[in-house]
Image (cartoon, rainbow, N blue to C red):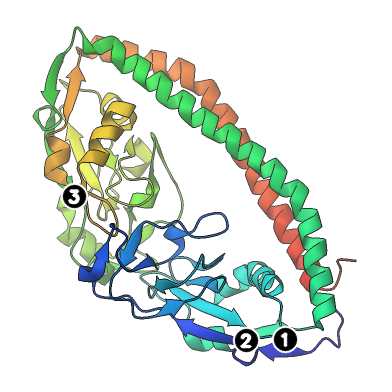
Amino acid sequence: MKSDTPRYLLKDVAIIIAGQSPDSKYYNTKGEGLPFFQGKADFGVLYPKIRTYCSQPTKIAEKDDILLSVRAPVGPTNLSPGKVCIGRGLTAIRPSSRICLKYLLYFFRYYEVQLQKSGTGTTFKAITQNVIKNIEVPVPDLYEQERIVSKIEELFSGLDASVAELQTAKEKLKVYRQAVLKEAFDSVRVNSKRVTIRSVCETIKVGIVIKPTQYYVEQGGVFAFRNANVRRNYIEDKDWAMISQEGHQKNLKSQVHKGDVLIARSGVNLGMAAAVPQEYDGYNAIDVVIAVPKKEFILPQYLAQYTNSPYGLEIVRKNQHGAAQGHLNVKEYGNLPIFLPNIPEQYSLLEKIESRLSVCDSIEQTIDISLQQAEALRQSVLKQAFEGRLI
């Protein structure tokens, strides 16, 4: 970008519409009203995924408005697929005639890191409308904007193809993983007794659900699991919540220990389960299902793998509740049936699963590293484009 390129405040080159969530009683999944988008969790590759509708919308975005996630997390963008209702996690941005839609969209994707740094709040990071309105946008003439967009898309086309191949490979690994688990648990169905998960657990409970944000602190507290930290048979070791020592003491019933099994209660990883390793012993938990296995009957890893298997996931999804977002009921999780061989047979089954999935895990890790490198390259292209170094 040339040094003399004029810069404008966003409020001077775009219409800005702050989202506002309607009363939840107006949400539905029957297609009544407008599609409702709350935040980043709804985003697809280009347009958001329609999961929920709202019969009494408050704030409305039009087709191809830029939807900006303004909290949890700050910065990601998508395009509106049409007239939609937007919740308070989003702001719609409609460019004026002096600025090209794709140019502004790419600018926001370049500017995402800076926006994240502008986020404030102890519960979760968020940006205010004042921050958004006063973003400085370089606005060259339309011809130069179109040239920049064309160059970005030329460089992105090869990158997108590589990323698509990596994502396809990752999906194939996911299918393979489920096939391995199905075959493993098929092998014990015939000769094993069928019991409920509750009958082989000391207790099944849920983490803090009543105003957990009242306990949040920035430092000096106790880390707490959230649904995003519970993945399919492993712990996502990032983006932890932290609660105060006082809050931890008030909620010791939701403290987790080595060998507990955590199950994501909501979100995109609904129903995913992982056994707690030693390094997370003593953490707390927020809105996560906590199953404490009776070790004489069932191995924690066996319970986690069964929950992650096609049998477990299908039953979990059938028993989820909530229109806007699926939610796993603790009581119903406890009532789920499980095939229970003896302990030696459980160990044997887990060894077979591990031997077949270890290579799968290694390949998936390599793919994830490649995807991270691709994203870094994408950001490098955007940085060059908006710093005037993309010829």
Q: Name the residue under label 2.
A: 10
- Mark 1–mark 2 Cα distance, whole angstroms, equals 12 Å
Query: What kind of residue is marked 1?
Result: Arg
Callout 3 crowding tier (Cα within 10 Å): few <14, some 14–19, many ≥20: some
- Depth order, front residue of 149/183: 149
Look at discs 3 and 1 and give the one toward the viewer. Answer: 1
- Mark 3–mark 1 Cα distance, whole angstroms, equals 52 Å
From the top left corner, tell me how far across and down residue 191 is, in percent: 19, 7
From the top left corner, tell me how far across and down residue 220 is, in percent: 36, 64
Residue 221 shows in the view: no
Query: What kind of residue is marked 3?
Result: Val
Asked whether the residues under the numbered discs 3 and 1 touch, taking CB atoms below 8 Å apart as contact, a structural biologist would say no
Asked whether the residues under the numbered discs 2 and 3 touch, taking CB atoms below 8 Å apart as contact, a structural biologist would say no
On residue 98, the disc is 1
- Depth order, front residue of 264/65: 65
From the top left corner, tell me how far across and down residue 188 is, in percent: 25, 11
Asked whether the residues under the numbered discs 1 and 2 touch, taking CB atoms below 8 Å apart as contact, a structural biologist would say no
- Depth order, front residue of 335/172: 172
Q: Name the residue under label 3.
A: 206
